[in-house]
Image: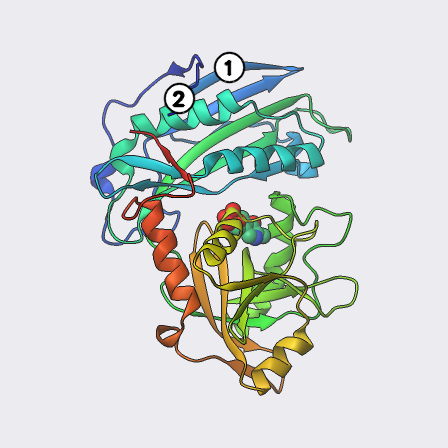
C-alpha cells in the first residue's frame, strides 16, 4: 500500500449528517459526505492543506475561474469491497489526468502527495459514507480552480484544489436512447476535448437538452472535420460491437481518455474478444445495422460504468434499434467482470485496486 506524508490540518464536525441520508434513494450527487479536503496554492507554493466540514466556500466575484474557466475536475469512486474494506480503482490515473488537464489550461500541477494524501485521509475520516449495496459507491469529485481576484486576462497566481464526496447508487438504471448529433460539435483538433474542464460540459448542455425534448437521454458526438466519425456519447466513451468485434475510436485529442474505456479495452482483450481501436463512421454504423451486424452499443465512464445504448436516432427518418441488452454477449460480461474487480469479488490480476483500509 502506498502511503503519503502530508500534514493536514483537521477541523472535524461534532455530529455526522449521515442519519439524514435516505440510503434507499441515493440518486447521484444529491447527498454530500461530512467533510471536504481543501488545498491552497499561492504564487508558486502549496500553502495549506485542510480537512473541513463540507460546506459553502466564500469566493470573490472577481475570481478568475468564474470568468475565464480555468476549472478542471476528476470523477472517481471509492468502493466497499466484499470484505467490508474500502478501495479505489486506478486512482493514480485520475491524478495524472488531472495534471494533463492542468497543463493544458496553464495551471500548476497538483503534487501526488496532495491529491492522493488528501483523498486517502478524507476517505478514512468519512469511511462510513461508503455504501455497500449493489452498484453503490462513494463518488469522489476532486476539482481544481483558479482563485485569483484579478480581472485581467492571464493564468491565475492562486488556486484551490478541493475534494468532496457523495454516496451514490448506479447512475443509469435503464438502457439509454441517444441521438446522433449533427449540428453541435463537442471538440476540435488542437482544442480541449481531452481535458476534463468545465467548459466542455457547458458547451454540450444545449445539444443534450434539445435531444431530451425529442425523447433521447443524450447525444453521440461526431468529429468536427468530416462530420462523420463518432467520438463520444454524452460524457461517456463509446463502444460498438459489429460482427463480434468490439470497436472504439482512438482518443487522439478530441476524446476524453476515460479510465473505464482503457480498462474495458484491456478486459475485453483479456477475455479473448476481438477489439479494434479505430475510427468508426456513422455510415458504417448504419450499414452494419442494416446488414444485421450491429450487435451492441454502450458507453463507459466512472459514473455509469457500462451503460447499454438501445436506440440511436440516426436522423429524422431512421432509428437504430438494438436488441434487449439482456441478450447481449459482450457489454454484460464486461460490466460484470469490471464490477467484480472493483469490489474484489474476483482477483485483481491487473493491479487496478488501490486499497485504503
Ligand atoms: C469523465 C469522462 C469520461 C469517462 O472517463 P472515466 O475515466 O472512464 O470516468 C468520458 N468522456 C467524458 C467527456 C468525460 O468527461
Who's the residue at 30% across and 49% down the image? 136
Asked if one can make out residue 60 in the rendered structure from this viewpoint, the answer is: yes
Q: Farthest residue in the front direction?
A: 272
Give the percent coordinates (x, y) of residue 266. 50, 52
Q: Nearer the viewer, residue 271 or 84?
A: 271
The image quarter in which residue 349 lies? top left
228 sits to left or right of 42: right
Q: Quadrant of residue 317?
A: bottom right
- SS at circle 2: strand
Res 48 label: 1
Q: x, y (%) of residue 108?
A: 66, 25
Left or right? Give the position of 39 relative to 335.
right
Nearest the eye: 207 or 170 = 170
Q: Residue at x 75, y 47 (%)?
A: 191
* Mark 2 in CB contact with mark 1 (< 8 angstroms): no
Residue 193 in the image: above or below residue 80 = below
Q: Which mark is residue 51?
A: 2
Label 1 sits on a secondary structure element that is: strand
Residue 1 image point, x, y percent = 37, 25
**Residue 216 percent location from the top left of the image:** 51, 72
Answer left or right for 326 relative to 184: left
- Is residue 17 in sight in this rendering? no
Q: How is the model colour-coded?
A: rainbow
192 over 163 or under it: above or below: below
Q: Which dot marks residue 189? A: none
Nearer to the camera, 332 or 256: 332
Measuring 37% from the left and 63% from the top, which residue is drawn there?
333
Mark 1 burial class by Cα count in 10 Å: few <14, some 14-19, many 20+: some
Disc 2 and disc 1: Cα gap in Å?
10 Å
**Residue sitting at x 59%, y 87%:** 290
Mark 2 surroundings: few (<14), some (14-19) or many (≥20) residues within 10 A: many
- Cβ of mark 2 under 8 Å from ligand 1: the answer is no
Amino acid at each position: 500500500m502506498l502511503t503519503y506524508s502530508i500534514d493536514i490540518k483537521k477541523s472535524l464536525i461534532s455530529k455526522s449528517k449521515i442519519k439524514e441520508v435516505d440510503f434507499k434513494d441515493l440518486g447521484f450527487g444529491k447527498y454530500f459526505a461530512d467533510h471536504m479536503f481543501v488545498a491552497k496554492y499561492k504564487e508558486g507554493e502549496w500553502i495549506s492543506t485542510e480537512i473541513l466540514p463540507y460546506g459553502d466556500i466564500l469566493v470573490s466575484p472577481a475570481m478568475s475561474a468564474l470568468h475565464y474557466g480555468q476549472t478542471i475536475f476528476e470523477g472517481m469512486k471509492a468502493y466497499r469491497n466484499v470484505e467490508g474494506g474500502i478501495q479505489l480503482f486506478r486512482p493514480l490515473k485520475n491524478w495524472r489526468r488531472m495534471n494533463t488537464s492542468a497543463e493544458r489550461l496553464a495551471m500548476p500541477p497538483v503534487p501526488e502527495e496532495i491529491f492522493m494524501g488528501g483523498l486517502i485521509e478524507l476517505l478514512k475520516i468519512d469511511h462510513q459514507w461508503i455504501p455497500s449495496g449493489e452498484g453503490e459507491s462513494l463518488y469522489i469529485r476532486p476539482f481544481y480552480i483558479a482563485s485569483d481576484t484579478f480581472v485581467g486576462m492571464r493564468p491565475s497566481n492562486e488556486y484551490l484544489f478541493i475534494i468532496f464526496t457523495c454516496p451514490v447508487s448506479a447512475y443509469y438504471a435503464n438502457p439509454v436512447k441517444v441521438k446522433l448529433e449533427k449540428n453541435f460539435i463537442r471538440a476540435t483538433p488542437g482544442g480541449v476535448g481531452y481535458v476534463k474542464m468545465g467548459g466542455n460540459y457547458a458547451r454540450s448542455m444545449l445539444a443534450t437538452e434539445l435531444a431530451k425534448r425529442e425523447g433521447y437521454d443524450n447525444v453521440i458526438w461526431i468529429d468536427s472535420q468530416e462530420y462523420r466519425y463518432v467520438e463520444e456519447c454524452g460524457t461517456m466513451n463509446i463502444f460498438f460491437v459489429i460482427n463480434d468485434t468490439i470497436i472504439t475510436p482512438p482518443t487522439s485529442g478530441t476524446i476524453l481518455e476515460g479510465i473505464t474505456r482503457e480498462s474495458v479495452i484491456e478486459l475485453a482483450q483479456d477475455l479473448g474478444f476481438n477489439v479494434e481501436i479505430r475510427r468508426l463512421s456513422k455510415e458504417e454504423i448504419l450499414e452494419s445495422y442494416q446488414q444485421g451486424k450491429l450487435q451492441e452499443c454502450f458507453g463507459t465512464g466512472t459514473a455509469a460504468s457500462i451503460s447499454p445504448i438501445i436506440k440511436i436516432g440516426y436522423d429524422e427518418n431512421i432509428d437504430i434499434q438494438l436488441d434487449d441488452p439482456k441478450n447481449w454477449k459482450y457489454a454484460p460480461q464486461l460490466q460484470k467482470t469490471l464490477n467484480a474487480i472493483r469490489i474484489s469479488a474476483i482477483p485483481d490480476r491487473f493491479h487496478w485496486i488501490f486499497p485504503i483500509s
